[in-house]
Image (cartoon, rainbow, N blue to C red):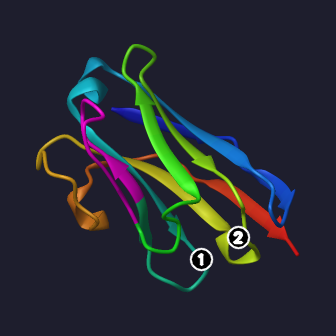
C-alpha cells in the first residue's frame, strides 16, 4: 500500500481543514487506518483511527469533538476533517495503514505503511 497525504496548509485559529490520504492497492479496503502527527523533536502521536469498514473510530483526547475521521473505500481515500483548529494543532500530519493487526491501535509501531506527511499551520 502506498499512501499520499494532502490538504495541509496555513489557516487561522478557529478555521477548518480537511486532510486526505489517497491509497493505492486494494488492500486499503481491509486495513485499519489512522492519522498521526509529529512536532519537531517529539514523538509521533496518535490523532484518530478508523477500522476497515468504518464501524469504529477512535480519537485522542486533544482532538475529540473537533476532528472527524472517515474513509471512502470505493475511492481508496482516508479523510480527516479538522474543525476549530488551534495553534497547538500546528504540526506535520501523517496517515498510516495497519494491514496485519486488525485492531484499532494508537501505537505508531503497529502501523505498517505511512504517507509522507502534510504540514498544518494554525496562526493565532
- Residue ranking furthest to the bottom: 41
Question: Quick one: SS at disc 2?
Answer: loop
The residue located at (38%, 50%) in the rendering is 34
Q: Which residues are magenta?
A: 48-59
| Viewer-closest of 9 and 89 | 89
Q: Are marks 2 and 1 in contact (CB under 8 Å)?
A: yes
Residue 50 lies in the magenta stretch:
yes
Q: Position of residue 91 (x, y in %)?
A: 65, 69
- Left or right, residue 27 beside residue 73: left
The residue located at (20%, 29%) in the rendering is 30
| Viewer-closest of 71 and 91 | 71
Query: Is residue 25 depicted above or below 113 in this figure?
Result: above
Q: Position of residue 35 (x, y in %)?
A: 45, 54
Q: Position of residue 110 (x, y in %)?
A: 21, 60
Which residue carries the number 1 mark?
A: 39
Query: Is residue 52 depicted above or below 17 in this figure?
Result: above
Quarter of the image that includes the C terminus: bottom right
- Left or right, residue 26 beside residue 68: left
- Left or right, residue 64 beside residue 104: right
The residue located at (57%, 58%) in the rendering is 93
Question: Quick one: SS at disc 1?
Answer: loop
* First of labels 2, 1 by sequence position: 1
Query: Spatial distance from mark 2 to mark 1, Cα to Cα?
Result: 8 Å
Q: Name the mark on residue 117.
A: none
Q: Position of residue 86 (x, y in %)?
A: 73, 71
Which residue carries the number 2 mark?
A: 90
| Viewer-closest of 117 and 56 | 56
Amino acid at each position: 500500500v502506498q499512501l499520499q497525504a494532502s490538504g495541509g496548509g496555513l489557516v487561522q485559529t478557529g478555521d477548518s481543514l480537511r486532510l486526505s490520504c489517497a491509497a493505492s492497492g486494494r488492500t486499503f479496503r481491509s486495513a485499519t487506518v489512522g492519522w498521526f502527527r509529529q512536532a519537531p523533536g517529539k514523538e509521533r502521536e496518535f490523532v484518530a483511527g478508523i477500522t476497515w469498514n468504518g464501524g469504529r473510530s477512535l480519537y485522542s483526547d486533544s482532538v475529540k469533538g473537533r476532528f472527524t475521521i472517515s474513509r471512502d473505500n470505493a475511492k481508496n481515500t482516508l479523510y480527516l476533517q479538522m474543525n476549530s483548529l488551534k495553534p497547538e494543532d500546528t504540526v506535520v500530519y501523517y496517515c498510516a495503514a495497519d494491514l496485519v493487526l486488525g485492531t484499532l491501535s494508537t501505537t505508531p509501531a503497529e502501523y505498517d505503511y505511512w504517507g509522507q506527511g502534510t504540514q498544518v499551520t494554525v496562526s493565532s
